[in-house]
Image (cartoon, rainbow, N blue to C red):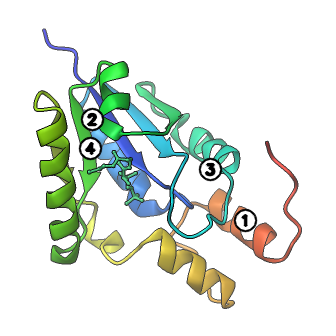
Amino acid sequence: MKNIRAIYPGSFDPLTNGHLDLIERGSKIFDELIVAILCNAEKDAPLFSVAERMDMLEEMVRRYGNVQVDTFDGLLVDYAQRKDAKAVLRGIRAISDYEYELRMALLNRKLAPQIETVFMMPAEAYSYVSSRLVKEVCQLGGSVRDLVPDLVEQRLLEKINGTAKPRG
Ligand code: PNS
């Protein structure tokens, strides 16, 4: 019997219902799934610290017996190999995601041919949900209910209203 461990990498700043949908799908087809938060993102300054993102993710994946949360920096394929993972899971919401995801998957394959990228589609209801838009809507006073878990909505409001408690 094969025991397939997969990595679901991302920034998760913050976790959305689209991410959770993918985690649930991934947990059903892989024996083990590691949700891996990228630490050294050179993108715009994150809203949530890595510790805050980890805290929210851990809370939300507690219900799945085969899902763990971790952090990584450096190359994804190096991390995947250290974890002895055979697959990388990524979500594709719309055709606009495809080009970036294809380039990343092919470059990762060039670096580490033994690791397969597996694409899954989140439920249609989340096809337009992204962390970036969620942050923007919330910062401008719009409701993000149904787009993120309640816990994330609460932490977003705390952060934006300046009432967040320090967590890690
Ligand atoms: O959720 P995101 O921000 O789109 O995730 C992007 C992520 C973390 C998967 C990607 O930036 C990544 O793997 N970074 C690690 C560095 C790396 O391996 N870069 C080469 C990828 S081709």
Q: Earlier in the sequence, mark 1 or mark 3?
A: 3
Q: Distance of mark 2 from mark 4, alpha carbons? A: 12 Å
Can you identify the residue that label 3 sits on?
A: 53
Q: Distance of mark 3 from mark 4, alpha carbons? A: 19 Å
Picture quadrant where residue 60 is located: top right
Q: Quick one: SS at disc 3? A: helix
Picture quadrant where residue 129 is located: bottom left
Can you identify the residue that label 2 sits on?
A: 28
Q: Are marks 2 and 3 in contact (CB under 8 Å)?
A: no
User: Which label sits in the foreground, 2 or 3?
Assistant: 3
Give the class, few, some or many, for how many residues have Cα within 10 Å of label 2's Cα (few <14, many ≥20). few
Q: Earlier in the sequence, mark 3 or mark 4?
A: 3
If the image is split into quadrants, where does the C terminus sit?
top right
Can you identify the residue that label 1 sits on?
A: 154
Q: Distance of mark 2 from mark 3, alpha carbons? A: 23 Å
User: Which label sits in the foreground, 1 or 3?
Assistant: 3
Give the class, few, some or many, for how many residues have Cα within 10 Å of label 3's Cα (few <14, many ≥20). many
Can you identify the residue that label 4 sits on?
A: 89
Q: Are marks 1 and 3 in contact (CB under 8 Å)?
A: no
Give the class, few, some or many, for how many residues have Cα within 10 Å of label 4's Cα (few <14, many ≥20). many
**Which residue is depicted at the point 43% across and 39% down?**
74
Q: Is residue 33 above or below residue 36?
A: above
If the image is split into quadrants, where does the N terminus sit?
top left
Q: Earlier in the sequence, mark 4 or mark 1?
A: 4
Q: Position of residue 143 (x, y in %)?
A: 61, 83
User: Which label sits in the foreground, 4 or 1?
Assistant: 4
Q: Distance of mark 2 from mark 1, alpha carbons? A: 28 Å
User: Which label sits in the foreground, 2 or 4?
Assistant: 4
Q: Are marks 2 and 1 in contact (CB under 8 Å)?
A: no
